[in-house]
Amino acid sequence: MLELQNHAQASGYPRRLTLSRQFLLLIALLVAGFGIYGAWSFKTLNDLRVNGGLYKRIIQGKDLIADILPPPAYIIESYLTTRQLMDASSGKPVAELKARLQRLRDEYETRHAFWRGESLEPEIARVMLEDSYQPARRFYARAFDEFVPALEQGDKVRAQAVLDELAQLYEAHRQAIDKVVQLTNARNARDEALAQERIFKDSLVMLGILLLALVLASTAALLIARGTLRLLGGEPAYAMDIADLVADGDLSRAIEVRHGGPSSLLGAMRRMQSSLTRMVHRIRESAVSIGARAHEILDGNRDLSDRTAQQAAALEETTGSMQELAATVKQNAVNARQAHQLATSASSVAERGGNAVGEVIHTMESIADSSRQISDIISLIEGIAFQTNILALNAAVEAARAGEQGKGFAVVASEVRALAQRSASAAKEIKTLIQDSVGRVQTGTQQVGQAGATMRDVVSAVRTVTDIMGEISLASEEQANGIDQVNRAVAQMDEVTQHNATLVDKVAAAANALNAQAVQLSEAIAAFQTAASASHSLASRAPDRRTPALPG
């Protein structure tokens, strides 16, 4: 693709040069390097070989020095010095010549000691160290023991005779030196021939080693190239292109593996691409599912919030109704206690009226009728109490249910108020009848005797009414206690409802955060392009991306 090519040019990587061609280029460079090295080595060996250019220059310098300077192991200069002493007169020249002769003797002994320590061939060592040394040793001995003293004494005849003997010793020494030179030249010729042969053989061996090294290096380079290709599964440039695509989030390009199969780098990258593709699909589906669930939670939470608000409002209405009902029941209890007190007072009056039974007989008959009416009224009061109990039970059930059914408390409260009004009306009628009875009792005091039995019945009935009113009072108190418990339960329900409302708000905030995270996850995963997603946008993105071409 275009951007990958630009990246390759920017990094300086030879994307157009395959790995095989790079190794071939490496082999060519190795061959060229070994060739240059071999040529230079042959040139150096040729220069340094025996009878080569540099060797000849070294030998030439040695020969030049040998031709100019007299050799210290050859006494020719010492023999010349004795001749000069013979011809010289006394004075400074004679002293200088004697000093030179002594120096030449010392140099000869030094070189003789040197060559005695060297490993020479037996024949050369014998001629050099014995045949040439003995005449030279006698030469120096006769020169310093006889020749120089004769010259110092001025005995020219004796000096000439010794000089003739020195000439014979020099000649014997020279013949031995000539033989040493012949033997050494013969040895040098043999060594040069051997060196030439060895250089030739070593050159062939070095050439063979060079060729073998080239073959081994080329073979190793080819094997490394093949092994590298099998390890990579393809060209490194292609693997880099695929890695760039994966780094850019593009998982839609198929990876072709030409070498090595699944165990290669490209095979592993293909497995990685498949795993990443499956992972992206799963994450994308999970993000969509999380978003949908978050919306569902938000919708459900809003519905729950509305219901909670409605429940709170209903509880407030129920609380108000229960408070009104509690007030009514408390008032009923007060009225019942007052009626009980009145009934107790009536019972006392009836008992006191029993003493005047003789005079109020006829009046007591009216009282008996009134008592029957009181009995009916009391029955009505009992019915009202019974219905009040049932309504109280219904109120408890309605309080437990709460919710929308809480509206039933209004109906229950209305019924309770109606019953309370009826109870008040009955109490008034009882009061009126009792007052009437009292009046009749007052008017019928003369009929006490006749109304004795009836008066006793009235006393008994009044006691019964007193007991009933006590039970009504107790029931009213129990109703008040029950309503208080219902009020506390409703208050607890209201507190729980408020807590639920707070939790609903927290759940709403969490759902909003979850929805935002789902959106962020969807946006993050949208950076990855798989084959399924690429099929929808292939036409629009085709000019920007192309599948990386496999190198040929």
Image: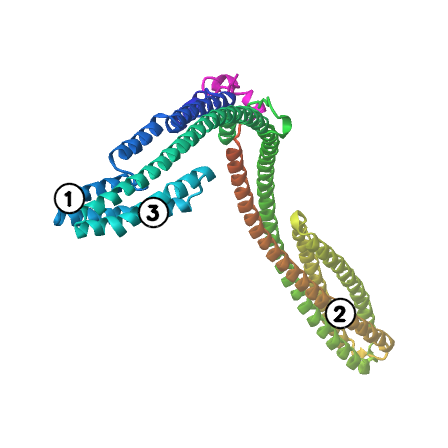
Name the residue carrying label 2.
469
Magenta stretch: helix, strand or loop mostly: loop
From mark 1 to mark 2, how far is it between C-alphas? Answer: 188 Å
Q: Percent position (x, y) of residue 251?
A: 55, 27
**Residue 227 vertical placement versus 363 (above, below):** above
The kind of residue on which mark 2 rests is Met
168 on left or right of 308: left
Give the camera-side residue of 225 and 207: 207
Mark 1 surroundings: few (<14), some (14-19) or many (≥20) residues within 10 A: some
12 on left or right of 415: left
Name the residue carrying label 1.
88
Residue at (18% x, 52% y) in the render: 153
Q: How many marks?
A: 3
Magenta part of the chain: 530-552
Q: Percent position (x, y) of residue 311?
A: 61, 49
The kind of residue on which mark 1 rests is Ala
The kind of residue on which mark 3 rests is Arg
Q: Percent position (x, y) of residue 258?
A: 59, 21
From mark 2 to mark 3, how far is it between C-alphas? Answer: 176 Å
Name the residue carrying label 3.
137
**Label 2 secondary element:** helix
